[in-house]
Each structure stands twice: as structure tokens, then as C-alpha cells.
Amino acid sequence: MQIMKNSTSDSIRSENSNWWQDAVFYQIYPRSFYDSNGDGIGDLQGIKEKIPYLKDLGIDAVWLNPVYPSPNNDYGYDISNYQDINPEYGTFEDFTELLDAFHAQGMKLIMDLVVNHTSTEHDWFQNSRRNPDGPYGDFYIWHDGIDSGAEPPNNWNSFFGGSAWKYDPLRGQYYLHLFDEHQADLNWANPKVREEVYRIMNWWFSHGIDGFRMDVINMISKDTSFPNDTRELDDLAVKGTPYFINGPELHNYLKEMRAKVLSASTKFAVGECPGAEFEDVLALSGMDGEELDAVFQMDLMEIDHGSGGKWDIRSWTAAEFLSRLSRWQQGLEGRAWPANFFSNHDQPRALSRLADDNEYHFESSSLLAVILLSLTGTPFIYYGEEIGMPNADFRSISDYRDVDTLNFFALERTRGREEDELLRIIRYMSRDNARSPMQWNGSKYGGFSSTEPWIPMGRRYAEINVEKDLSSQRSVYREYRKLISFRKKTAALGYGDFEPVESDHAQLIAFMKRHRQGDYLVCANLSTRDAQSRLSFLAAFLPGAVGTELEYSNYKRTTLQDQELKKGILNLRPYEACILKITKS
Ligand code: GLC
Ligand code: CA
């Protein structure tokens, strides 16, 4: 599908835009959203019950993390059957009921498509290992080891630690797994694999879903000479990425998928593309519409990753934050449609990571909403973000469920690192920080379930939950609702041209969104101290700009501050975020 020209100053919002360009998405991690039948596991009926909550917030579309049958080594990202529902979450009838219920509200639903790999319990894999000459023999990436099989075929690593190869004694060969050893990579070089994937996608479309979020889709093509990675790398870094991220056939495969599945439809295809560079995103989701509709790239959310990757935490500055934001907002302008997010099931909670989840909880939560909802592109709100859910912050390693976290802990322990140090890192960076149950109220299991949940409640659920938030004077949910509705009537936010201003301020970020229907300035103080911006720069950016009008602030503004603003001085209190309309002569 062609993506409409989105961001020159005279583009017209909504006329001719695709539905996902106007939509505000909400991502649900089904296992942790709402448990309707008291087994401690979130489920599809539970989601259905909460549709009014989402509708009221102003949500247009939902992305569901995988709900297919899975042995849960990676909680659904290891699929054992693509055409059914995990009984833990309900039946296929529950699924169609849920889909109908969304559609009845005028909402859309997109599913997760995990086709870089399957679970090793998938029939295809079991057939493949048992019968190398059979129809599934070539469905996975099998290779002989070196040194008469004693060593894996090359030095590539799994993203979850250790070698990316696992020896299978039955077949007598190694198979590739870029993720957990129970997630075997499919062999996309085999046209039969691709046909199966397209068939499955069409099958889901025939059941009425509105699109797919495509898991690590930029890794489906591998360099089939499987060379060693000879770069000098940090111990924690993943070896082999140049040979499987953005591999030689990637664009051909996606063009084929577009032709065979996605063309001439109004389905939405957003690809998750870790490690994607700017040029890659243009090639994958450029306006020619030949491959994907949008891409999730990780650049901004890797701002605190050091040279060793996610477990190697580094500090960052406001200036760097704005520069990363600008790079993509400006770079993609008029060329590709962005997909924006601060949190998801793979990231710790942005609130705890980028702002202050404690003293300035309300301000920080609403500040993130201001920035996310002011960006050009489709915003994805992650469940709980709308009430300022902070990191789960578990204290004991036994509270964690995530294979990536547990592998990191075990591996680094064998390398001799202290338990305390590892737990400190995990408490900040583990994916489980963002997978704890939705905090509906302050009762024993947070209103999520009537029984002990599959993963503990976040530590602060009694203090931060939907019930409390909605009854508070300063409700984060109501700020989100207000900002979503403001975004929907303000073309500059979702569609405008982005221009960074104040690009080397130590505390705050400021950017303009320009559109022929009106120009706006967004300012956010990312620090715990007051910060000042002199709006004198406005004249330079916008000839004819005479002043600003405050449209939104997450603080109550005083008359004195209004007067200062008239003089071009904007004083922002800790984590204050404002949207100002620029007035012209
Ligand atoms: C993606 C998913 C992540 C999963 C991995 C392997 O990055 O978002 O949750 O573990 O792929 O499927
Ligand atoms: Ca349940």
C-alpha cells in the first residue's frame, strides 16, 4: 500500500491517509493484562472486558503480543502452531469474539507475526530433525559442526547469550537459533517456507485481522556462507549481526510478501527491526510502499546501551535524546512513516528509565505522553503507560521469568560477576520490568486476577493503579486522554514537519511541529531542576512568529508565568512539558 505523503507543510491530514496513520495504538501483553477466569494468566476474554477502558482513552487500534500455542520458553515468541490460540488465553472462538468486539467499537486489531523462527516443538521442526530428506528437512538452518562436529559451525551468538547454534543428536547436525535454543530459525532461502508463511498470513487475514507487527523481520535472510564474525567486540556484544541483520535477500523476501499477501489490502504491516540503520528503514518502509508500512527501530530506546549492548548501561543527556529523536523524525520526513514508542515488552518501563518514577511521577508520566503524542508517525502506547506504571523492580532473581534475563544472570555468574551487581543491572534493564500484571487496583493481586499471577505484581502496585489514578486530582490516564484527543484535532502533531530547537540544552528538549494548519512548539524539561528556555529563537525559525499561546502543560501555570511567556521566557519546572501554539502576525 502506498503511504501518503505525510509531512510537507501543505499536506492535508486524513484526506487520503491510511487508517494506521491516524490511529493511536495500544500494545497489550496478553499474559499480563486481565485474567478473566482466575488462573493467574491474562486471557482474551479479559481483554474483551477492558475494551471500554481502551475506547474511553481514545485508542483506535491494538497490537496483541503472540497468543498462539507455545511452550512459553520465550512466552509466545516460540510458536508451536501458527493457526490456533494458546489454550491458556482461550479458544479460537474467544479470539473471533474479541476481534468482533473490537470491530464493533470501530477499533482495529493487529497480531504478532513471528516467522524468523518457530518453537522447536513445532511439527515442522520435529519433522525436520527426524527426517532430513522429508518435506520439512530443509525448513530450518542445519549445518555440520567443525572439528568433526565438536564445535558449532561459526562464532555467531544468540541474542539471549551463548552460541547461536545447538547440536541436535537425532539429526547429527547443528541448527541456528538467534534467540533461545527452543526457537529454531526458519530457512527463508527455501521457497516452501516462504509459501507457508504467506499462506498463514492470508489465513489470518481471511479471519478479519487488520495487520501484523512482524517480529525481528530484518533477520529472516542470512548470509548463507555463514562466516565468522571477526570484529573486536565487547564480551557482552552479539557476534554475527552483520551476517543476519539485513541479510542479502531481505528486500526480495519482503517484496515477495507484499506481492503475495499485502498488496491491494488495507492491512497494516509494521516490522520490528533491531539494529536497523537509517538507510535500512528507508529501504524497508519507503514511500514506494513495496515492503513494509512502518518500522520499529530501536535507536532512541538504545540511548542507555553501552558498547556491550543492553546489559551494559550508560548515562545520556537531554541533548542526545533530542538528537536521536530528530535524526529519525527529520530524516524520515516525507520519505517513510515512523512508528513511535517509548516502551514495549522488550524494554524496561520508559518512565523509570527516562524520567523520574517517584517524586515527579505524575509530571514524568504525562511528559512522556506529551512527547510521544507530538511526534509524526503512529504512536504506540504500552499497557500501563497511561497510568504511569513504573518498572516492576523485583528484588529476587526467583521473581524473574524472562529467558533473556535468566540467561544473562546465569552466564555472568559463571564469569564470576557478583550477584548484587547483576541484580542491580537486571532491576533496571530486565524485560520483566514491563511484563508484570496490569495494575487495576490495590487489592491483593492488583485486580488483575483472583489468584497468584504467573509473574509477581510490580512492587508499587498498591500505590499506582487504575482505580487510584482515576480517583486522583492528578490522573495520568486523563492527561493521556486529553493529549490523544488534542493530537487528533491538531494536524501538526501527527503529521507536521519536525524541527529541533534548543538542541544543546543540558536539561530540556524543545522542538517545533509545523503544518499549514498551525505551528506548535513542544518543550519538555527532562530534569529534576527548574529549566529555562528563551523563546527568542522562534523568530529565527519562523519569520512572522509573534508569540505563543499555551495549549497544554502538565503543571498549573500562574499569571506571572504567562507574563514571562509573553516576554519570550519559558520557565519549566521539573519534568514540566508544554505544548505552545505559535501565533503569527
Ligand atoms: C523480538 C520480540 C522479543 C522476542 C524476540 C524473539 O525482539 O519482541 O520479545 O524475544 O523477538 O522472538
Ligand atoms: Ca486466565
Image (tube, grey):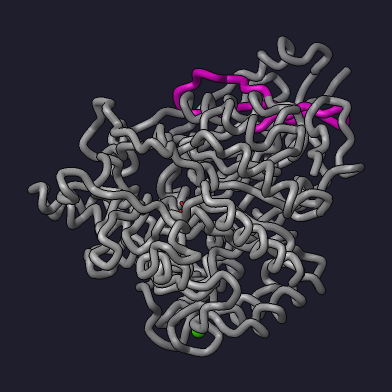
Residue drawn at x 60%, y 73% is: 83
Q: Give the quarter of the image for residue 44.
A: bottom right
* Range of residues picked out in magenta: 499-522
Quadrant, the C terminus: top right
Give x and y (percent) for residue 578.
64, 37
Quadrant, the N terminus: top right
Q: Is residue 146 visible to the viewer in this orientation of the structure?
A: yes
Residue 519 lies within the magenta run:
yes
Above or below: residue 222 compared with residue 429: above
Above or below: residue 545 compared with residue 67: above
Residue drawn at x 33%, y 38% is: 309
Give x and y (percent) for residue 501.
62, 20
Residue 172 left/right relative to 67: left
Above or below: residue 165 compared with residue 61: above
Residue drawn at x 40%, y 82% is: 444
From the viewer's side, name the closer residue of 334 and 225.
Answer: 225
From the viewer's side, name the closer residue of 123 and 116.
Answer: 123
Give x and y (percent) for residue 479.
65, 54
Residue drawn at x 67%, y 71% is: 53
From the viewer's side, name the closer residue of 523 and 292.
Answer: 292
Residue 363 left/right relative to 49: left
Residue 99 lies within the magenta run:
no
